[in-house]
Image (cartoon, grey):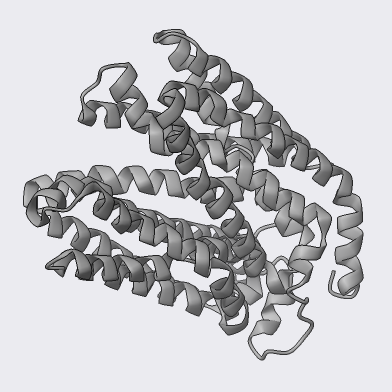
Amino acid sequence: MAATRTPTIRRIFPWVVFALAFGLLLADYMSRQVLSAVFPFLKIEWALSDSKLASLSSIVALMVGLLTLPLSLLADRWGRVRSLVLMAVLWSAATLVCATATGYEQMLGARFLVGVGEAAYGSVGIAVVLSVFAPHVHAALSGAFMAGGSFGSVLGVAAGGVIAVQFGWRWAFAAMAVFGLILAVLFRTVISDAKLARHATDPAPARREDGGGFRAPVSTLFTNPAVLCAYLGSALQIFTAAVLLSWMPSFFHRYYDLAPDKAGAFASIFVLLVGVGMVVCGMITDRAGRADMSRKWTTAIVFCLVSLLCLTVGFGLDNGASQLVLIGIGAFFSGGSSGPAAAMVASLTHSSVRASAFGTLTLANSLLGLALGPFVVGVLADHIGLSGALRLAPLTYLVAIAALILGKRCYPSGLRKLAALNPAAS
């Protein structure tokens, strides 16, 4: 009976890790995006300008961009589970402080701490998840995990809006904080670094407990050309997905004459398509790359091409069903290369620095995609209109495709370079 129970536990535990890590990612983005739901309340109660409201949101993204890599490096050395729990407690406690803020300065300070807490969660969380799963499902898991950002954003705005209207805006922050703290306690109770080491598909992370064993140099995150191509290709394909997440409500408000609340609700459908597309495209990639891992580069290229064509043509059409269908297809594939790119980063970096590798990937995604995309389209929209700017945004896929093609060519040499680091462990 004991022999039967052990294999069952080994099969279940990785999915428990995924479920709890994904739940915390939802809590991460719910705490981050609930602010958008209470903008109207803060603007009236504290008489804030739009620029101050925007600063409350941008301070979180800024901290995530600046601190992702150093905090990921720290997590690789200090312990990933302990780091994740500390991050979740920090951002949840800071969100609770938001609920008690009495003015703009206090809210800005609390949002600063939210950003510090959330900075490295995505990179360390995905490293923990992939450590207990076989490589042939990494693309699907990476896509599903990263899609949690889209789902969490929708949940944060929707639930936050309902709570704010029914009970007041402070309770919207408090609810997100309590949700995050409960999950943090549950995560720490069920998961430990020792358990992860016992279930690891790559045994190298187990040596983090005593600080011994081989540790790859941090420089290897930047000296492998194939890894650099994966960073760049991922960041530039998320550029357009970020544009859709930020500007679709304005697009429907301006060009379909929808009221702001209805425009936001309609845009949420396309936000969900982005998230669902990440999951499905990851599953397609794992199936296509089961016999040959290099095919994962190919699927990433195909997803970029499909989104490029559909979005460019779709935003060029007149309002109507045809435009919406094409934009919907383009949105579905807009972030589809996220899973394949993350899987390539995992396959090309040593497990001892994998959280740091995902920290670098998150940094690239944040600075070149999530932050740059909406800003560039906003600048273009001031000169040529939002519709024209949205037509041009998908052209960044051309650079992403070029990076992914080069990455595929460098992939075999990249694997040899990784194997040369530590032949015994690799």
Q: Quadrant of the N terminus?
A: bottom right
**Left or right: 159 with respect to 170?**
right
Q: Nearer the viewer, residue 374 or 13?
A: 374
**Left or right: 16 with respect to 343?**
left
Task: Please report the residue visible at 28 percent of the width from the left and 32 percent of the height from the top.
Answer: 264
Q: From this viewpoint, which residue is outermost toward the front? A: 383
Residue 347: x and y in percent read: 76, 57
Residue 26: x and y in percent read: 39, 54
Task: Please report the residue visible at 85 percent of the width from the left and 69 percent of the height from the top.
Answer: 426
Q: Is residue 6 above or below residue 51?
A: below
Q: Nearer the viewer, residue 234 or 43?
A: 43
Residue 293: x and y in percent read: 81, 45
**Left or right: 254 with respect to 142?**
left
Q: Is residue 408 above or below residue 382?
A: below
Task: Tell me if I can see residue 328 in this picture.
Answer: no
Task: Please report the residue visible at 8 percent of the width from the left and 54 percent of the height from the top.
Answer: 45
Task: Tell me if I can see residue 415 in this picture.
Answer: yes
Residue 331: x and y in percent read: 51, 29
Task: Please report the residue visible at 90 percent of the width from the left and 51 percent of the height from the top.
Answer: 412
| Quadrant hosting residue 335 | top right
Q: Nearer the viewer, residue 16 or 98?
A: 98
Total residue callouts: 0
Q: Is residue 209 above or below residue 295?
A: below
| Quadrant hosting residue 301 | top right
